[in-house]
Amino acid sequence: MITTDMTPDDAGEYRSFVEDLKRRVREARLRASVAVNQELVLLYWHIGKDILDRQKRLGWGAKVIDQLSADLRRAFPEMKGFSARNLLFMRRFAQEWGDEEVVKQLVSLLPWGHNIRLIQKLADPELRLWYLRKAVAHGWSRDILLLQIDSGLHAREGAASTNFSRTLPSPQSDLARQVVKDPYCFDFLTLADDAGERELERGLVEHIRDFLLELGKGFAFMGSQVHLEVGDEDFYLDMLFYHVVLRCYVVVELKSTAFKPEHAGKLNFYLSAVDDLLRHVGDQPTLGILLCKTKNNVVVEYALRDMNKPIGVANWETKLVESLPDELRSTLPSVEALEAELSAADTHEVRTETDEA
């Protein structure tokens, strides 16, 4: 509330002052929460390491975990996370992450619940580290982390057929290749077998947040059916994005059929038009991503071989429900109902595992 004795200039200065203080408080709270999480994860790692060391050196059996849990709970009744189950997981946590520096610099940046799921889902240390780095870089929630693991993001990223190495300079070509996947998983959509490009496009626009998540970090949505006028004729891009890391426009064309060479030719034309009509000074060459229902990699290779614009071709996949008969499809619960149920179950499971740590 602004006092009445303030001049308009004073009132403006005061509002600016308050907004600045709010920002600083929010930033301080965020730093504090991150620091608290790091300390908690490091504490759990040290507890787990100490348990491992003593069991190995002194031959302590499994019963020591129950005794330790009881003693710690009695000493710190206000603290959660000292259940026997969580202590066992601390031991496993220390066993899986043996390098303290890695834990300090990277692992501790994720919440405890994330770390539990990473170890439960991924036995391969290198693969686990790959997803950990991605989760830290992208700020994934636990649900999104699980979604990316289940969809095999590590195998899809950079797997699309492209001509980037020939049409883009290094390191732009390497960065561009990393942002294009194959296949793209549109599990947030439910489409009929005979759905066309417009139905696919409409579904992606309606679920644009999910689509942006699947595209990956750095994509900004600019619009669908974006109008271009070339030679007094009208053309419309299915979807237009801007990639803030690559510093370039990205045209996404959607096909509900198998890849055909003429699809690449049309996209090549669109990229030329965007470069001339929309691209600004400082922008890198516009990228094209062609998403098809299926593709023959040999046909794609021949189609892209002499194209002078950077184009990537990938498949898209959606829910299994699309192949079910109508009478069965209608009996299935909605996507929203399933997500709500899974989210509730996930929350309950993690609380059980960590004793609400």
Image (cartoon, helix red, strand yellow):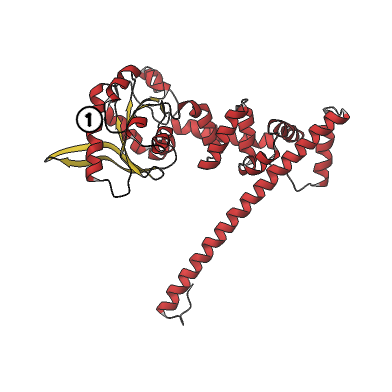
> Which residue occupies 41% across, 22% down?
321
Rendering coords of residue 92 (x, y %): 72, 31
Rendering coords of residue 237 (x, y %): 25, 37
Rendering coords of residue 222 (x, y %): 32, 44
Above or below 355: residue 24: below
User: Which quadrant of the figure has residue 26?
Assistant: bottom right
Tell me the SS state at disc 1: helix
Q: Is residue 94 left or right of residue 13?
A: right
> Which residue occupies 83% across, 44% down?
74
Above or below 143: residue 313: above
Q: Compare residues 246 and 54 and report the one nearer the observer.
A: 246
Residue 231 visible within the image: yes
Quarter of the figure that contains the C terminus:
top right
- The residue lying furthest to the left in this view is 232
Q: Which residue is mark 1?
A: 266
Q: Residues within 10 Å of mark 1 (few under 14, many from 20)?
A: few
Circle 1: residue type? Lys
Q: Is residue 128 left or right of residue 11?
A: right
Residue 345 visible within the image: no
User: Which quadrant of the figure has residue 287?
Assistant: top left
Q: Is residue 81 left or right of residue 271?
A: right
User: Which quadrant of the figure has residue 101?
Assistant: top right
Q: Is residue 341 left or right of residue 349?
A: left
Rendering coords of residue 169 (x, y %): 36, 37
- The residue lying furthest to the bottom in this view is 5
Q: Compare residues 145 and 123 and report the one nearer the observer.
A: 123
Q: Compare residues 98 and 5 and report the one nearer the observer.
A: 98
Q: Compare residues 69 and 244 and report the one nearer the observer.
A: 244
